[in-house]
Image: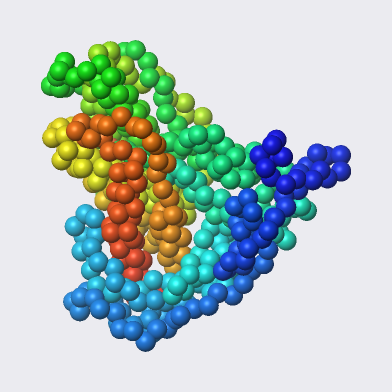
């Protein structure tokens, strides 16, 4: 199969295991090498160059500045002082604040390597540091999910890999590393609602004929042509199934918060968010009925594997950041845009709730980071860069449903990248700065 995919292979012994060869390697920063087939590998670790500390003085807001120059950022190594202005949901975080990078892999701790960047390297997730850590004939190579809520990083190739790059997979699929090998997985949209991820795969219930999930809407679809009605019913069904899965995502999140002894306010907000998602799902199934003329609802939702044996602060922080801080911030903006284009009240109601859910995600992220300690700043920096590198799969020839509140994949991609840069990035940097100050104040206590 690998040969058919254009991957150079040679057979080793009688096991049938394949070896991965990097043809025409081109060297890049961080010891990364790009092969002719697009694979990015890391034969050797390097020490990154740092431009820190820079002479420049950060131009922020004197009332809120936490630093003026890089020299003020001393909580961890490789501190940079930059502007972080604005927070998506009203909590003011303006002014200059510190963020922290890396020069070597050791600066990143376990499970991460240092990717060189300007003004200083950034830690990224990695299961291997160099090719030498992989089995014979395998390489330490980069993978990146195309799913907005998915992940990425470095991991060894294996003889069991089904793909090495997205081009090895079919349309609408992404080559992802999970459960110890690379496989082609279906890309699921990550919009209007929190996905219910189990082993990194979104879990959705099938739609079945039933009439007890459709809230009545005043929407009159009679004036629309049949094609538009069916395209709208299809889009609303996607939304409805996603919203339905979000109920389970919050139910699980509530249990995980309880397991970690979280504050009552977070637990109460998570339980309320689950109820919001149930209403969104019923509203959306109502829209399916209004446009499609047939009442459908969710079938049984499989829960196998939904709850692991243990709940881990770091893992939960990453999931909440991806699903909530990034996913629901974008979902809120998409729903708001849908409302302004279509004037439909259903979008306004969903937008307001999704904004609350994003706020809850930021509050949960802050609490989890406080429990983890200084390492949380690295995790957040890594997750931020991962979010910035994501993109929405672009589809050509989509039905034009803008007047009904739905964005095309091209519009969603523009909205997503703008939201990450203008809202998620400054809010994350500001949170990191706030945590740094907090850890600084707490530090003397831990001496005793
Ligand atoms: Fe939500
Ligand atoms: Fe929702």
**Residue found at the far right of this picture:** 13
Q: How many marks?
A: 0
Q: Position of residue 358 (x, y in %)?
A: 28, 48
Tell me: 257 left or right of 290: right
What residue appears at the point 72 percent right and 43 percent down from the top-left corner? Answer: 159
Tell me: 160 left or right of 116: right
- Is 149 rendered above or below residue 237? below
Tell me: 358 left or right of 252: left
- Is 224 rendered above or below residue 47? above
Quadrant assignment for the N terminus: top right
What residue appears at the point 25 percent right and 66 percent down from the top-left corner? Answer: 85
Q: How is the image coloured?
A: rainbow
What residue appears at the point 64 percent right and 56 percent down from the top-left corner? Answer: 35
Out of 310 and 202, give the one closest to the viewer.
202
Quadrant assignment for the C terminus: bottom left
Q: Position of residue 235 (x, y in %)?
A: 31, 28
One can see residue 364 in this view: no
What residue appears at the point 41 percent right and 21 percent down from the top-left corner? Answer: 206
One can see residue 335 in this view: yes
**Ligand 2 lies in which image quarter?**
top left
Out of 264 and 338, give the one closest to the viewer.
338
């Amino acid at each position: 199969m690998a040969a058919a995919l254009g991957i150079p292979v040679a057979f080793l012994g009688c096991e049938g295991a394949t070896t991965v060869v990097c043809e025409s390697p081109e060297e890049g920063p961080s010891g990364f090498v790009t092969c002719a087939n697009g694979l990015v590998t890391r034969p050797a670790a390097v020490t990154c160059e740092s431009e820190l500390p820079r002479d420049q003085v950060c131009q922020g807001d004197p009332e809120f500045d936490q630093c003026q120059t890089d020299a003020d950022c001393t909580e961890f190594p490789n501190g940079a002082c930059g502007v972080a202005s604005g927070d998506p949901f009203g909590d003011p975080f303006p002014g200059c604040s510190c963020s922290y990078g890396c020069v070597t892999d050791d600066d990143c701790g376990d499970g991460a390597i240092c990717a060189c960047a300007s003004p200083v390297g950034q830690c990224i997730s990695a299961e291997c540091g160099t090719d030498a850590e992989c089995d014979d004939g395998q390489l330490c190579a980069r993978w990146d999910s195309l799913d907005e809520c998915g992940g990425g990083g470095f991991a060894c190739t294996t003889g069991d890999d089904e793909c090495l790059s997205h081009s090895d997979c079919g349309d609408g699929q992404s080559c992802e590393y999970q459960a110890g090998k690379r496989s082609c997985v279906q890309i699921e949209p990550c919009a209007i609602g929190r996905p219910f991820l189990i082993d990194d795969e979104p879990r959705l219930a099938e739609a079945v004929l039933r009439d007890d999930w459709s809230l009545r809407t005043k929407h009159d679809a009679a004036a629309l042509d049949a094609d538009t009605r069916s395209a709208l019913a299809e889009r609303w069904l996607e939304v409805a199934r996603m919203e339905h899965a979000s109920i389970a995502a919050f139910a699980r999140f509530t249990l995980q918060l309880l397991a970690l002894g979280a504050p009552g306010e977070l637990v109460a907000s998570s339980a309320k968010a689950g109820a919001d998602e149930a209403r969104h799902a019923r509203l959306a199934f109502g829209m399916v009925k209004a446009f499609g003329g047939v009442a459908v609802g969710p079938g049984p939702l499989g829960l196998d594997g939904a709850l692991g044996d243990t709940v881990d602060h770091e893992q939960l922080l990453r999931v909440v950041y991806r699903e909530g801080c990034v996913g629901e911030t974008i979902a809120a903006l998409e729903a708001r845009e849908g409302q302004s284009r279509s004037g439909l009240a259903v979008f306004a109601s969903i937008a307001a709730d999704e904004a609350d859910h994003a706020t809850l995600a930021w509050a949960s992220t802050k609490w989890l980071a406080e429990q983890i300690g200084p390492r949380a700043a690295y995790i957040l920096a890594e997750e931020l860069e991962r979010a910035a590198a994501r993109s929405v799969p672009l589809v050509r020839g989509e039905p034009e449903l803008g007047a009904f509140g739905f964005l095309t994949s091209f519009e969603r991609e523009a909205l997503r990248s703008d939201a990450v840069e203008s809202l998620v990035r400054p809010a994350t940097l500001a949170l990191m700065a706030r945590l740094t100050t907090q850890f600084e104040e707490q530090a003397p206590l831990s001496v005793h």
